Image (cartoon, grey):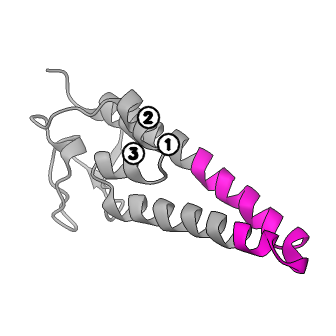
Amino acid sequence: MAQHVFCGRCGAVLDTPWARCRSCDAATSAMNPYARRKSRWVAATLAIVPGVGHMYLGEWRKGAFFLLSAGGLEFLGFDLDLTVIGDLLGVPMGIGGLGMWAFSIWDAYRIARDRDRVSPAT
């Protein structure tokens, strides 16, 4: 059974896990056989601060997204909790921020784990 590896930037099928993409010419550290492997546990631990685990893995855009979205939801949710409409908007926004935080931890762990599976044996 053949295992397909996809480009992280454009989604095209790659010839080998460490090949440069023919469509967008992307080469990430996950596709580089000589790149240093990143620990999935360190990524999950760093993701206690939303987005930092992704930044450790080199996913800067995704890390910034998690940092801004989870932080923004928590900040706005807490700010709205101090007003009359806090029960309607503030509490759900706070719960959404906690959900984004939990997903950030799981996603950083998953990305590091999947990169370990794709990397060629050394």
**CA separation, marks 3 and 1?**
8 Å
Residue 100 among magenta residues: yes
Q: Quadrant of residue 38?
A: top left
> Is there a contact, CB below 8 Å, between mark 2 and mark 3?
yes
Instruction: Tell me the chief SS of the magenta region.
Output: helix
Nearer-N-terminus badge (3/1): 1
Look at mark 2 in the image and give the residue it sits on.
45
Region in magenta: 78-102
User: In the figure, is residue 76 to the left or right of 24?
Assistant: right
Across and down, in percent, residue 51 comes to 43, 54
Can residue 57 be seen by looking at this rendering? no
Disc 2/disc 3 C-alpha distance (Å): 7 Å
Horizontal side of residue 85 vs 54, given as left or right: right
Q: Name the residue nearer the viewer: 109 or 47.
A: 47
- In terms of secondary structure, where does tag 1 sit? loop
**Which structural element holds mark 3?**
helix
Residue topped by disc 1: 48
Which residue is depicted at the point 75% across and 56% down? 95
Tell me which residue sits at (20%, 58%) in the image: 21
